[in-house]
Image (cartoon, grey):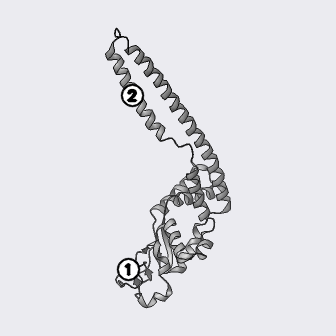
Amino acid sequence: MIRPVEEHYKTIRFPPAFVAAMRAGMESALADTEAAQRLLRKQLEDQLVTLETKEENLLDLAADATLPQGKIRARLLDIGRQRERLRSDLATVVDDLSDGEKFLEANLKMLEDPHALYMGASDEIRRKLNQAIFKLIFVANEEVVGDEINSPLAELLAAQHGFRAREAGLNKDDALDQALAELEHHSAPTTRATPKGGSCAVAVEDPLTGIDEDVNCITPSAVDPRRFELLTSSMRTRRATNCAKGP
């Protein structure tokens, strides 16, 4: 089981050109977004100041008993509602997006050479890598035949697919279509069928537990990505001849 998973890590590597393009685009987008957020904050704060001025003027008018007090109170209530909306909007403004940048950078870094990272990792680190990257991997006949990848790696892999399509000469719309198709593939993967009687395996939570020998091998089995490192060749005495499945 370990070998197919190790080989599958070669298929999700980000090429250097894509990583460089993503970093450049990310820096530009972050700069633009942060500038827009700062402008939005300034606009909201200015509107709050304007409301405060209006409120003070109305309070001064309210001191004159000859003026219509009902209208003044209604205006003050309206200003109060506007102030609450502005404060609510202000609370959603994010001036510093560096945490998001660090998160995306960590994901780019992880897939610069995931195979080398996986091969040199301990079982515990492999488990964490599997959990970080995959929701599911489908394995049949000692071969990975499909996967479901976590966000944002699924989106980044789709973007990479579109990037390669553009490099190959496709126009922007066709490249986008390919990227969206790739995203759908990794979000709701389809898998190749396996002939009846072909070997398939699913990970078990505990390698010492019992085995169910009645699994239908026509459909590839979904492997819990947390447990790949437990299914070593030393377990063959605990495996069924056709299919092995944990409880």
Residue 35 visible (yes or no): yes
Q: Position of residue 234 (x, y in %)?
A: 49, 88
Q: Which residue corresponds to the image point at 51% horizontal and 31% vertical from the top-left?
A: 45
Contact, mark 2 vs mark 1 (Cβ under 8 Å): no
Name the secondary structure under disc 1. loop
Residue 174 visible (yes or no): no
Q: Which numbered dot is residue 129?
A: none
Q: Position of residue 121 (x, y in %)?
A: 58, 75
Q: Position of residue 123 (x, y in %)?
A: 53, 77
Q: Is residue 146 above or below residue 19?
A: below
Q: Earlier in the sequence, mark 2 or mark 1?
A: 2
Indicate the quadrant containing the C terminus: top left, top right, bottom left or bottom right.
Answer: bottom left
**In the figure, is residue 216 to the left or right of 158?**
left
The residue closer to the viewer here, 88 or 170, is: 88
Q: Is residue 182 above or below residue 238?
A: above
Please, what is the three-letter code of the amino acid marked with disc 2? Gly
Mark 2 highlights which residue?
80
Name the secondary structure under disc 2. helix
How far is the residue under mark 2 from the one under mark 1? 61 Å
Q: Position of residue 172 (x, y in %)?
A: 60, 49
Please, what is the three-letter code of the amino acid marked with disc 1? Gly
The residue closer to the viewer here, 43 or 241, is: 43
**In the figure, is residue 166 to the left or right of 137?**
right
Mark 1 highlights which residue?
246
